[in-house]
Structures are given as C-alpha cells and as structure tokens.
Amino acid sequence: MVVGANGSGKTTLFDVFGFLHDCLKGTVRQALDKRGRFREVLSRDAETEVIFIEIQYRMLISGVERLVTYSLEIGEQNGSPIVRREILRYKRGRYGSPFHFLNFRLAKAMQSPTKKISRKLTKTLSAKPKKSRLIL
C-alpha cells in the first residue's frame, strides 16, 4: 500500500514501472510518446535535462543474497531521445566491486539493446524465483 498527500508522486511511482515495461516492449521513443514526449516526462523542477531512474532490490544469486541495481539515464539530442547510460549490476560481496551484467552508454533510443538483453535477463532471473525487496 502506498499512501501520501495529493501531488506527492504516488502515481508517478507506479508509472515508472509502466514506463520501463513500455521501453522493453517497444522503444524508449514509444514509451516517451505515450506519455507526451520527453519534456512532459522530465520532472518539472529538474535541474538537468535528464530522466534518471534507479531501482535497487535484493535477490539470491548463486545462493547468496545480493544487492542488484538497475539504472537508466535518458537524454534528448536534436529532438530525439537517447539512452545515455544503462547499467545492471550487483554487489559481489560486502567489499568487492560490483559485477556489471550490463554497462551501456550513448545509444539511440530506437537501437537500444534493452529488448535483447531483457529477454536473456528474464530467462536468467526467472529460473529460480526468490523473494525480493524493492528499495526506492
């Protein structure tokens, strides 16, 4: 259950997941167009012209609970959306450096490797469903 005052971002929180779904199902451009294009999705009081989404959760990987981080940075260039950065990583241990399953920079939104990688990732992660906790 999510509770908050009017205008506090409850709907936006849930739309982030819908936006990511639409990006994976189609393209970043299609997901943005569905929501009124880049300028409408950009936070009204944003200091930079970048859409940044980061999701962290814990899941079992090789029998050990790991912190997994997915981040997506979308910008605009010549009126077209571009994926500036996309990262999927998990912590190997308390002190180890993160393992980057995906580390992608500056792709045109229509040619983002997200769809291909999401199929592989979905197959990998759905092999043994484990309890996860979402940290926002």
Image (spheres, rainbow, N blue to C red):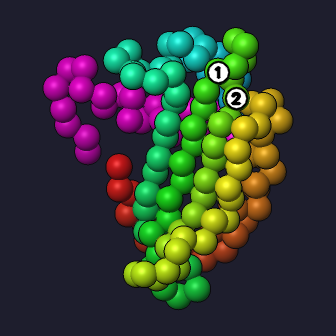
The relative height of residue 71 versus residue 39 in the rendered view (above or below) is: below
Element on which disc 1 rests: strand
Residue 36 x %, y %: 57, 11
Sort mark 1 into few (<14), some (14-19) or many (20+) by Cα contacts within 10 Å: some
Element on which disc 2 rests: strand
Residue lying at the far bottom in this picture: please name it.
Answer: 63
At x 39% / y 22%, what residue is drawn? 47
Residue 53 x %, y %: 49, 40
Stretch of the chain drawn in magenta: 1-25
User: Tag 2: residue type?
Assistant: Ile
At x 58% / y 17%, what residue is drawn? 38
The relative height of residue 91 versus residue 118 in the rendered view (above or below) is: below
Nearer the observer, 103 or 26: 103
Residue 2 x %, y %: 25, 40
Counting residues from the N terminus, which is met first, the one under dot 2 or under dot 1?
A: 1
- In the picture, the quarter occupied by the N terminus is top left
Residue 31 x %, y %: 64, 26
